[in-house]
């Protein structure tokens, strides 16, 4: 007997309004589109550049850099990509983090990525031009790798992918994106005897630096053609066995290759340790709590009184602001306990974002507050931390993006910082009373890491000039004029003034790796204060009660960052005076970066982005036969548009002749997100039929349609609403009298439907 129950038609059901803790526990953080992107496509000879109206400020520059990168790499690989490569650009890194191409989101510190599916490159363009060019070359190298290794087919990657050091090391080597500052990681591994085998899997950021060194070794020992030989040999190698490809190309086994590579590295770097040293040879280290479990200390900021030093620390499994006693260099306490209830994380150039220049903390002149930037929602907010009581004193939101390196003015009324607005990276000031933000530099070069002079007249900062970074200063009474402090072939950055304003300390790679230097602004006399084989950077000045001063800096050694303090009376080395110009810079005094190919934009090459086309993004399959010789299988297919804004996920499964399907369409282009779903779920049981044979039959079937909307208020809270209708067929239990009058359970076929 079948019974049918009729229920009211479709109803609208408000499911839930999630609160912060519940949302995090049940769903994780929300994916939010904070801005509307009006996408267009610019078609250049080798790229389809996807950009929005907000990003067209840098379109011409980006296309020129991309075409220059393609020309260089196609000649290096001796390979031509037949179809234009999709290049998806965002004006800022915070906008880039809103992309929907990686469905689960990407880490805050990720700078760009390339996908083997449709060979897309996705990146922000708020970088100095040399860095942007290197970033494009790095990701474009991956596209060449995907075409060569996988022969341009999605299924090619199923044969196995080479280890991370191979993929990322080659990309870094071909892009020539390793700075002298980056070399501290491989130098540290060499002098501390921590070089792994080429069979290494994973490795994080170190794999980039290790792989870069491996390819440098290959080029020096066997020539650059050997690199192409290796990638083509990897294409013919099933799985990810790098050892087999190494054997065929270089006629060396893995152990022999490792031995030769280590010997090459030692020859290159160990001699430098003899003439240099470790960071602790030039300063006394700071220490965390006994038994704290390690962690990093970076971004020192000294109090005006000279008795305290603040720094970012990570020993508590998150980025905190800690306060140290400057006399004994021990931590007094953590100032940011419970901060994660108000902000997501503190911005750290050695933790959450790419290293650019400057310290991530600034001490107020009265010693009561520390300035930092923290991520809350789509971008960063300025936060003031109470030094006396701990915790947050104030949170200040602003339109400027990608803010870094806060610096208090001597009177405590304003904070200078680096940031991005309208496609340009400049130095800004915010008035702490009115909260008005002023663009101080307002120029084309990329500017970073500002620092006030003690009298408040000058503002020194880092600017990118040609292929290098240099230090300039401006007279705040006339910000239109720039005065060079350095202008040479080295990278000079993150200036800080001495207590009397007569000297500027800064980081420079003139020794072959980042170290701390100082220059007298009157005489031009230069001195070097550290000479580590790895790196020392982020200097800050600690004033002393007797009128003297010390330097506190970040040093890298044995795979960790620590703080060190040293006197300035006896520098490591002194140099002949350099010329510190007294007249302002003229146009052309600081060179511009010039790509090999300059593209003139043609409006006829601009098309609107059409969202109607889907392609297969991913496929997962399972197949098997059980002990009863019954075939089972499952296929999960994911379709997407080029930007990942719209997705179709189909989950199809079957056991013998019984099948399920669950298909979901999801649109997350805007902040309001919506989805539709159709499904048919079945469960079966095995029965003995009248002849004694086992048969399979449905005992439950659920078929339905559902639609819903999602609106996230922030990363923790959102509202959802859905409506749907479900039909069921199932074998229910009932009770009946047998011929003897005994009540027994029986299976009764039923069906029903409900909203």
Image (cartoon, rainbow, N blue to C red):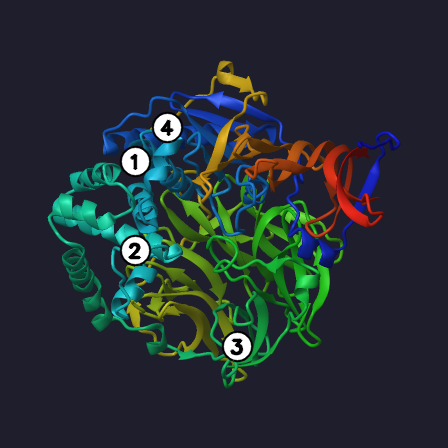
Residue 77 vs 370, above or below: the answer is above
In the rendered image, residue 144, in percent from the top left (x then y), is placed at: 32, 33
First in residue order: circle 1 vs circle 3: 1
Examine the image and state in which quarter residue 1 appears.
top right
First in residue order: circle 1 vs circle 2: 1
SS state under label 2? helix
First in residue order: circle 3 vs circle 4: 4
First in residue order: circle 3 vs circle 2: 2
User: How many angstroms separate mark 1 from mark 2 (CA)?
Assistant: 21 Å
In the rendered image, residue 595, in percent from the top left (x then y), is placed at: 36, 33
Mark 4 and mark 1 in contact? Answer it, CB < 8 Å: no
SS state under label 4? helix
Disc nearest the viewer among 2 and 4: 2
In the rendered image, which residue does mark 1 sit on? Answer: 149
Q: Residues within 10 Å of mark 2 (few under 14, many from 20)?
A: many
In the rendered image, which residue does mark 4 sit on? Answer: 67
> Viewer-proximal residue, 455 or 424?
424
Residue sitting at the far left: 251
Residue sitting at the far top: 604
SS state under label 1? helix
Answer whether residue 651 is visible to the viewer in this image.
Answer: yes
Residue 594 vs 45, above or below: the answer is below
Q: Residues within 10 Å of mark 3 (few under 14, many from 20)?
A: many
Query: Which residue sits at x=55%, y=28%?
Result: 641
In the rendered image, residue 216, in percent from the top left (x then y), is placed at: 22, 50
First in residue order: circle 4 vs circle 1: 4
Residue 594 vs 434, above or below: the answer is above
First in residue order: circle 2 vs circle 4: 4
Query: Which residue sits at x=34%, y=68%?
Result: 527
In the rendered image, which residue does mark 2 sit on? Answer: 210
């Amino acid at each position: 007997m079948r019974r049918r129950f009729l229920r009211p038609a479709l109803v609208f059901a408000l499911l839930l309004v999630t609160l912060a803790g519940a949302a995090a526990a049940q769903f994780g953080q929300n994916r939010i589109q904070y801005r509307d992107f009006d996408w267009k496509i610019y078609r250049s000879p080798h790229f389809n550049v996807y950009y929005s109206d907000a990003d067209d400020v840098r379109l011409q520059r980006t296309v020129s850099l991309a075409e220059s990168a393609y020309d260089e790499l196609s000649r290096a690989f001796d390979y031509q990509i037949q179809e234009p490569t999709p290049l998806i650009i965002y004006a800022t890194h915070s906008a880039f983090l809103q992309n929907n191409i990686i469905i689960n989101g990407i880490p805050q510190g990720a700078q760009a990525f390339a996908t083997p599916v449709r060979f897309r490159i996705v990146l922000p363009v708020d970088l100095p031009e040399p860095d942007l060019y290197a970033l494009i070359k790095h990701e474009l190298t991956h596209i060449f790798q995907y075409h060569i290794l996988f022969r341009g087919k999605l299924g090619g990657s199923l044969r196995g992918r080479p280890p991370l050091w191979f993929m990322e090391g080659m990309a870094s080597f071909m892009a020539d994106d390793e700075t002298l500052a980056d070399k501290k990681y491989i130098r540290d591994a060499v002098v501390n005897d921590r070089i792994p085998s080429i069979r290494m899997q994973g490795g994080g950021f170190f794999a980039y630096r290790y792989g870069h060194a491996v390819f440098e070794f290959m080029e020096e020992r066997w020539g650059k053609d050997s690199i192409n030989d290796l990638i083509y040999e990897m294409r013919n190698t099933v799985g990810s066995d790098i050892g087999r490809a190494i054997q065929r190309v270089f006629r060396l086994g893995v152990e022999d290759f490792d031995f030769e590579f280590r010997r090459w590295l030692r020859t290159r770097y160990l001699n430098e340790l003899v003439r240099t040293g470790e960071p602790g040879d030039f300063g006394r280290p700071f220490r965390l709590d006994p038994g704290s479990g390690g962690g990093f200390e970076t971004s020192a900021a000294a109090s005006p009184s000279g008795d305290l030093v603040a720094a970012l620390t990570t020993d508590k499994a998150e980025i905190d602001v800690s306060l140290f006693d400057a006399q004994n260099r021990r931590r007094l306490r953590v100032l940011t306990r419970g901060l994660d209830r108000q902000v997501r994380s503190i911005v750290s150039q050695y933790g959450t974002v790419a290293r650019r220049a400057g310290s991530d903390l600034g001490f107020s002149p009265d010693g009561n507050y520390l300035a930092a930037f923290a991520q809350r929602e789509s971008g960063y907010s300025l936060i003031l931390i109470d030094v006396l009581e701990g915790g947050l004193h104030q949170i200040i939101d602003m339109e400027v993006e990608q803010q870094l390196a806060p610096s208090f003015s001597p009177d405590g009324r304003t904070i200078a910082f680096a940031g991005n607005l309208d496609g340009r990276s400049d130095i800004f000031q915010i008035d702490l009373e009115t909260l008005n933000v002023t663009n101080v530099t307002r120029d084309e070069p990329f500017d970073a890491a500002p620092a006030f002079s003690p009298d408040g007249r000058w503002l020194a900062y880092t600017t990118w000039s040609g292929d290098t970074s240099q230090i300039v200063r401006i007279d705040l009474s006339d910000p239109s004029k720039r005065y060079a402090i350095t202008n040479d072939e080295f990278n000079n950055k993150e200036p800080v003034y001495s207590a009397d304003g007569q000297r500027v300390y800064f980081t420079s790679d003139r020794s072959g790796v980042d170290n701390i230097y100082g220059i007298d602004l009157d005489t031009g006399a230069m001195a070097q204060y550290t000479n580590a084989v790895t790196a020392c950077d982020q200097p800050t000045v600690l004033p002393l009660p007797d009128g003297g001063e010390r330097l506190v800096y970040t040093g890298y050694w044995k795979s960790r960052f620590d703080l060190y303090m040293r006197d300035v009376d006896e520098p490591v080395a002194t140099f002949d005076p350099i010329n510190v110009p007294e007249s302002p810079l003229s146009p052309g005094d600081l060179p511009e970066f010039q790509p090999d190919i300059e593209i003139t934009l043609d409006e006829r090459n601009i098309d609107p982005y059409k969202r109607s086309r889907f392609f297969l993004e991913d496929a997962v399959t399972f197949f098997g036969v059980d002990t009863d010789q019954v075939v089972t299988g499952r296929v999960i297919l994911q379709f997407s548009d080029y930007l990942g804004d719209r997705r179709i996920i189909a989950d199809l499964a079957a056991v013998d002749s019984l099948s399920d399907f669950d298909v979901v369409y999801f649109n997350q282009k805007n902040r309001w997100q919506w989805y539709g779903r159709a499904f048919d779920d079945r469960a079966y049981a095995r029965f003995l039929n009248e002849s004694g044979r086992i048969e399979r039959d449905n005992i439950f079937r659920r078929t339905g349609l559902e639609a819903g909307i999602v609106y996230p208020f922030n990363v923790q809270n959102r509202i959802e609403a859905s409506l749907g209708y479900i039909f069921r067929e199932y074998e229910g239990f009932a009770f009946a009298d047998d011929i003897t009058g005994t009540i027994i359970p029986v299976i009764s076929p039923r069906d029903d439907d409900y909203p």
